[in-house]
Image (tube, rainbow, N blue to C red):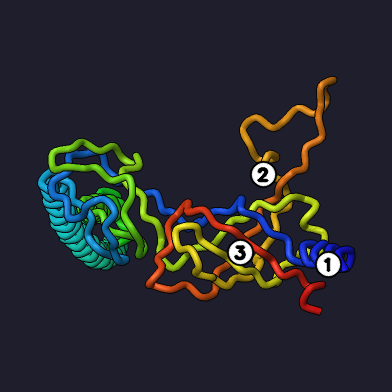
Amino acid sequence: MVVCAGYAYFHYRGAHPTTDDAYVEANVVHLGARLTDTVDEVFIVDQQHVTQGQLLFTLDPVPYELALAQAQDKLQRAILQIKADNDAVDQAKTLVLQRQAELQNTRSDTDRKLVLVKQGFISKSEADAANKNLAVAIQNVYSAQSQLKRSENIRGVDGKDNAAIHEAEVAVQQAQLNLKYTRVVAPTDGYIAHFDLRPGSKVSAYQEVLAIIQDKSYWVSANFKETQLTKMRAGDKAHVSIDMYPGVKFQGVVESISAGSGVSFSLLPPENATGNWIKVTQRFPVKIRLQNENDQYPLRLGASATVTVATTSSQG
């Protein structure tokens, strides 16, 4: 009878591996400002629950408001300059058309006088004068065309593709972005942690000033001995007990089994190629996704737990 009971217990333990080396985990978002500046206002306290988009704190906006106004003024001046350059181009085009019309008239007059001089109706000096006028008219067209080219080069590309306009617009967009960055908002729902800012505090760009522990993202990381993983598979059901809630059972499912042991990812992995090596059973992290979270029993990051997995063999 005792032997049968022992065998049944041994079989049950093999099919239901258990560990108390387990802890509640959650996604943690580390947050800082994108600018280096002075804190202006603070709207939260440590451990407070926040929602996505909620304003957490602000930086002094005045320098960035001034920078935006300057950028907008520069853009407006660039637009006015382009308008003036466009007017200059239009005037140069008009002049080219005028000089071309004058050339056409002068050429017609010169051709007529060249015929008349051959027929003896006018003097050679009049024909020479007509040729000089034609040369001047041709030079005037070249000069007008050169002026048009210079005006177009000064203006550059017309419209929004103009380099000066594009540069000024980018400066405005960056100034608007920097002003937006003075308002630091929550990127997700969760609980504030490690927060101790006060108005007047100096923050550096991208330096962490707080963390947000995402709610509704909890799981349990259970470290099982390698000898307990023989029959365990992803999808197996799990029973979880949290130490802070005695008697409360949480249901879960094995989501994944780590491909490496815990010590494999430590900063100083063990050196086994030494003379005093002692074999130690390794532990592998198993991720348990909880399925019946209850608001009456809020989970806490790092809370201790005990996990029992009903392996596939026990369910068959």
Q: Which residue is mark 2?
A: 262
Q: Which residue is mark 3?
A: 288
Q: Residue at x 68, y 59 (%)?
A: 18
Of 87 and 114, nearer the camera is: 87
Q: Position of residue 219 (x, y in %)?
A: 53, 62
Query: Residue 231 appears at what percent x and percent y?
Result: 81, 64
Would you name the residue on which mark 1 appears?
A: 5
Between disc 1 and disc 2, whose residue precedes?
Answer: 1
For disc 3, the neighbor class at 10 Å (few under 14, some 14 to 19, many from 20) is: many
For the residues bearing labels 3 and 1, Cβ distance under 8 angstroms? no
Instruction: Name the foreground residue: 142 vs 186.
Output: 186
What secondary structure is marked by label 3?
strand
- Of the 4 image quadrants, the one containing the C terminus is bottom right
Q: On the rendered structure, is 92 left or right of 270? A: left
Task: Say which quadrant the N terminus sits in.
Answer: bottom right
Place of residue 122 in the rendered image (x, y in percent of width and height, measured from the top left):
20, 61
For mark 1, give the secondary structure.
helix
Residue at image x 32%, y 45%?
194
Q: Is residue 206 left or right of residue 91?
A: right
Q: Amino acid at mark 2?
A: Gly
Q: Which residue is most to the front?
A: 1
Residue 196 placement (x, y as % from top left): 24, 42
Gap in Å between the C-alphas at discs 3 and 1? Answer: 30 Å
Task: Assess whether mark 2 and mark 3 are in contact (beta carbons under 8 angstroms).
Answer: no
Which residue is drawn at the image coordinates 45% and 58% (left, top)? 244
Q: Amino acid at mark 3?
A: Ile
Label 3 vs label 1, nearer the camera: 1
